[in-house]
Amino acid sequence: MNPSLSHAATAAAAGSPDAEARIRELAENLPLEQQIQLLTGADVWATHALPSIGLSRVVLSDGPSGVRGEDFDERHDSVSLPSSSALSATWSVETAHRYGQVLGQEARRKGVHAVLGPTVNLHRSPLGGRHFECMSEDPRLTATLAAGYVAGVQSMGVGATPKHYLANEAETDRFTADSVVDERPLRELYLAAFEDAITEARAWLVMSSYNSINGTTASENKLLETPLSTEWGFDGVVVSDWTGVRSVEAANANQDLEMPGPVGHWGPKLLAAVNDGRVSRSAILEKVIRILRLAARVGSLEGVAPAVAELPAALNAAAVAREVAVRGAVLVRNRDGLLPLDPSALTSVAVSGHNAEEARTQGGGSATVMPKYTVSPLEGLREALPEGVSLSYARGAKVAEGLQAFPRTSLRNPVSNVPGMRVTFLAEDGSDISGEDRLASHLIWFGVGIPEGAAAIRMEADWTASTAGVHHLGVGTVGHIRLSLKGDEVFNGEIEDDTDVLGAALFDPPKTVHPVETAAGESVRIEAVYELPKQRVIPFTAILLGEETVLADPQAEIDAAVEAAKTADVAIVVVGTSAAIESEGFDREDLDLPGFQNQLVEAVAAVNPRTIVVVNSGSPVLMPWLDKVGAVLLGWFGGQEFGRAITDILLGIEEPGGRLPTTWPAALGDVPVLNTTPVDGKVVYSEGIHVGYRAWLKQQAQGGAAPALPFGFGLGYTTFELGAPHAPQSVPAGNDVVVHVPVRNTGARSGREVVQVYLERAESAVERPVRWLAGYAGTHLAPGGTDSVAVRIPARSFGHYDGGWQFEPGTFRILVGRHAADDFQALEIGIR
């Protein structure tokens, strides 16, 4: 080891002047070739190590609602937390902090140093494919929750990575699209969503996006310097989205780390650019210092103590997953107090909906993790309902399109005689290189896991049919594969990628499907051999063995659900989306529930007035039956504890704590900001500062349609009274304001209220939204309990951006209520 590291036992703490001096010294003493090597990843998920200076690798992993680690191997399971839209629905910075801490714990367990989350892009359009992965449509709500998340992750000595910087609100043509945004909305909305995570929580990384902003791709954009580094003081690492660096020009911006590696646009090309003067040595040095600083913070640089010396007490990850799912669930209809149900008064419950049995607990794409288990609503109800209650289930309507992985319990490994399947890696001559026992039938290798010299992969399993009849079994992948069922070869050929979306084949691959008739309980031998491509631009392989649900008579499915619901005390219909609808890589085409789910709800509600609908989607869907059912609970993508959380709420064990983080429309044509498709390569943010509820309020002021459910809305199982708010009558420009609001629980149960404070200024020399969220705070009160809730309004809420932050003197109205369209209590405040 380098003799200069002999004092590691008395290492300076990361961030101290001594540590900064040491980091700079190490960076300056590296040869240029080694400096540049550090700026591109060593592989798909990690940076380079340099043992000579005590630098070990820094491992990054996809988030933002779980930590997958360096592989997609289901044997290396991950906690699956509810989606970011569910987290945002909690309107709780404290919950976001616990959520982040669990991610930090998971990262440490998996040897990960940086979590690639939170995703803080705004819900500009409900069609955005990663809507579920983002937080909200409002910059203030997003910024505060993102800061809580980042602080929670980093309390565990693990870096957090707010992404995708910047103006990355859609997936269509995401690698090439140019987001055209005026300076004011850029500052007041899209940059504001990131600001607290940097200036308050001091995030250790930021991820630049794929898209361009106003004509310059994100990894080369001056926005990486101003405001990020200059005004906000960001001293961490700007990491590219994977393959997001397009040229050596990015080195002249504040782009620090190119991922993945080891081959990219930097390396030898960047070395040449420095040698011929196109990129300065000082720019390279600054990037190396930032990477070493990150390594020091996460404990990967000897001689510098990590940023966190003492970890907080461990949290129960499953309990936090359940807590977030409960706190984020939004009750939006509860006719005649149908909820909560009294289990002791129930004799029969009829459950229907594909998502009741096969719940969607996470969105598709890089957010995907492999949990040890998931609990569906059907399982949650079976666990919790008293023994004497009759519980029936009918699918009612199909949701999951295409090939679905086999349930793990249905697979037997014919080689090892254990649950799961056998995977064998074959050499060019067909001989075995190595084998492994896998638990799941959806296999993904991204950068790691396939041994050197492998030319093919053989998969073998015995699958047990749960029912008699014709089953549609198949395989999904891209490339050449042979498939045999019951010993008969049913396919031998090439499956071609039918999409140009990078990585889509990982999660929803093209497929070949074949019918097999079985008796109930019959075992079917499945064997597939996949030929690995001889050359791959990006080292990933995905193979999915599974079954496709094919309905011969959709109406019969609805009829069966209706028949069960007729005589039941209560009917619970679980509707929702899937990863084929909400995923990274593509935007949604509409907001409709897929298949015949709307017909199912209408039919069940027609025969049972005590119909409860649980919506299992990551983002808004249309609910044409909203006023026809007894109760509606929005559960989002609820993570691995989704079913138990929903059951807790339905049975009154827990209170539904959520408020909408985004507006839900009644019809697609009503949505004021909708389009996500570039025109001539550009997505023009022509709506300016009027996004989300701001756009809806502007539209309504002009006589247009109102939404089905307003931003901030949510019901509970108790009632609250908000008293007259108090605030200073005037304050100097640039000062924060605290609004005090008396709150009393006037109901019979304990519960949580979220006090929301908006600003408005009708008479203004500056264009403004009708109103805008300025602050919020929650309180939990017992029946009859009171509290004086203090809501801080940051000074910036009164400002507008015009070449700099400006404050128009005069009177603003402070509006206090429960959602963006409430009957507010108001008071005036002067800004001088």
Image (cartoon, helix red, strand yellow):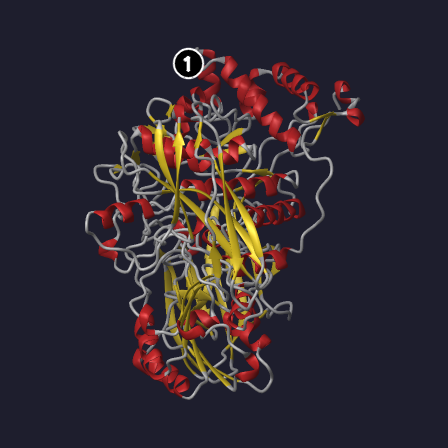
**Residue denoted by label 1:** 278
The answer to whether any part of residue 473 appears in the image is: no
Image quarter in which the N terminus is found: top right
Helix, strand or loop at label 1? It is loop
The answer to whether residue 550 is above or below residue 223 is below
527 w.r.t. 92: above or below: below
| Up/down of 96 relative to 385, above or below | above
Q: What amino acid is at disc 1? A: Arg
Q: Position of residue 368 (x, y in %)?
A: 49, 53
Residue pictured at 44% horizontal, 54% vertical: 364
Vertical comparison of 211 with 382: above or below: above
Along the horizontal axis of the image, is 434 left or right of 623?
right
266 to the left or right of 7: left
Residue 812 shows in this picture: yes
From the top left corner, tell me how far across and down residue 297 is, in percent: 65, 31
Residue positioned 66% across, 44% down in the render: 108
Image quarter of the C terminus: top left
The residue most toward the left is: 703
The structure residue drawn at horizontal position 70% and vertical position 19%, both measured from the top left corner, is: 18
| Closer to the camera in the image, 249 or 429 | 249
